Image (tube, helix red, strand yellow):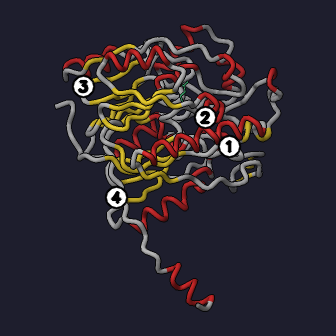
Amino acid sequence: MSTLERVSTAEQAPVEATRVNSWNGWDPLRHVIVGRATGTVVQAPEPAVRRDFPEDGFPLGTWGPMPEEMTAEANEQLDSFARLLSSRGIRVDRPTPLDFTQRVSTPDWEQESMFGCMPPRDVLLTVGNEILEATMSYRSRWFEYLAYRPVLQSLFESDPDMRWEAAPKPRLTDESYVPGFWDTYNTLGLGEQLDKVAANDLVLTEKEPLFDAADVARFGKDLFVQLSLVTNRQGYEWLRRHFPEHRVHAITFTNTHPLHIDATWVPLRPGLVLHNGERLATPELVKYFEVNDWEVVEAVQPASWKHQMRLSFCTPWLSVNLLNLDPNTLCVEAEEVRLADQLVGLGFDVVPVPFRAVAPFGGGLHCATVDIERDGVLEDYFP
Ligand code: ABU
């Protein structure tokens, strides 16, 4: 066979049929993206975020690749999780890492480094047959969508009904950030910080719509958008207009450093939400769930995992960052034994997954994944 024939045969290989479809976090999972730790960087400082890990080799102002041994261990756990999902018949796609140490720029700014492609949940939001690329709000994450473009392109080619959308790319000029925010915010008392969180008077201004996909919790027809350090009111407003068939709610919790909703208010199955009780919900939110006959269960305290806080910007509450395989089955971090017992008591089958080493790369089992396909249709769980 000539080279030409071989190429031509390869090009004609059938693309595996795919269907993008996911309306909530609990329907039976068929297809998912699992992130990669490869190339992750402790970001260079920027207006939205400043990493400060003096004990671990990255004091304020410094930046660079995560230590090789940590990256290797995280990749082992991610690969093993991907194999576990595959062994259960779930199709798994992976992102394509870039050189995240490279300097990036737009006509408006230059940034010394990118970040990585471990938490795909931050970047991509699946609602029904649509996958939406979030705006993001860190300059270091502006180009992160590129790591997912090969997967998205392939989904687009194989599913004629897929809607591939991208929210308006933000300018992220200095006007998008409150000047000197981090110098003052960290000197405020708890009450003052929580007042600012409730008013969403944080590092982002309202210059333009900004949101991370992981600030959206999907409950069928209802989408709950957490206003946070990475999601502003304009971001919520953009999402509300973008999903006119949904009820889109802006919500806050008593969390001094709100960053993604998926370690705070976690849908488990229709009628049951797991709540991180250290981050109180507003009475309005609790009432909305209660009048619709939902049970709100407070999660047990996370297991201690101080040893894994090295270079991590997440909290131990990644314990509740769970992935549903279906409405009765939950993937839970292997060391979170107390939480597993609580979930078994609530009627779930628990699949323990070693995942501690992934935390410093941006999250837990939910952060590390994005739904491509779950069985099920759009339903109204708050009629
Ligand atoms: N998506 C990560 C949430 C991390 C945290 O609340 O600690």
Q: Give the labeled residue for mark 1.
A: 115
- Figure quarter occupied by ligand 1: top right
Label 2 beta carbon less than 8 Å to ligand 1: yes
First in sequence: mark 4 vs mark 3: 4
* Secondary structure type for disc 3: loop
Identified at 51% across, 19% down, the residue is 336
The answer to whether residue 107 is above or below residue 134 is below
From the viewer's side, name the closer residue of 199 and 56.
56
Q: Amino acid at mark 1?
A: Phe
- The amino acid at mark 3 is Gly
Residue mark closest to the camera, 1 vs 3: 3
Q: What residue is pinned by disc 4?
A: 19
What residue is shown with label 3?
Answer: 271
Callout 4: SS: loop
Mark 1 or 4, which is nearer the eye?
4
Cβ–Cβ below 8 Å for labels 1 and 2? yes
Please, which residue is most extreme toward the left here? 383
Q: Label 4 CB, ligand 1: below 8 Å?
A: no
Q: Position of residue 311 (x, y in %)?
A: 71, 28
| Residue contact between numbered discs 1 and 4, judged by CB atoms under 8 Å | no
Residue type, label 4: Arg
Q: Is residue 305 left or right of residue 199?
A: right
* Residue count near mark 4 (Cα–Cα under 10 Å), binned few <14, some 14–19, many ≥20: some
x and y percentages locating residue 88 in the rendered image: 40, 45
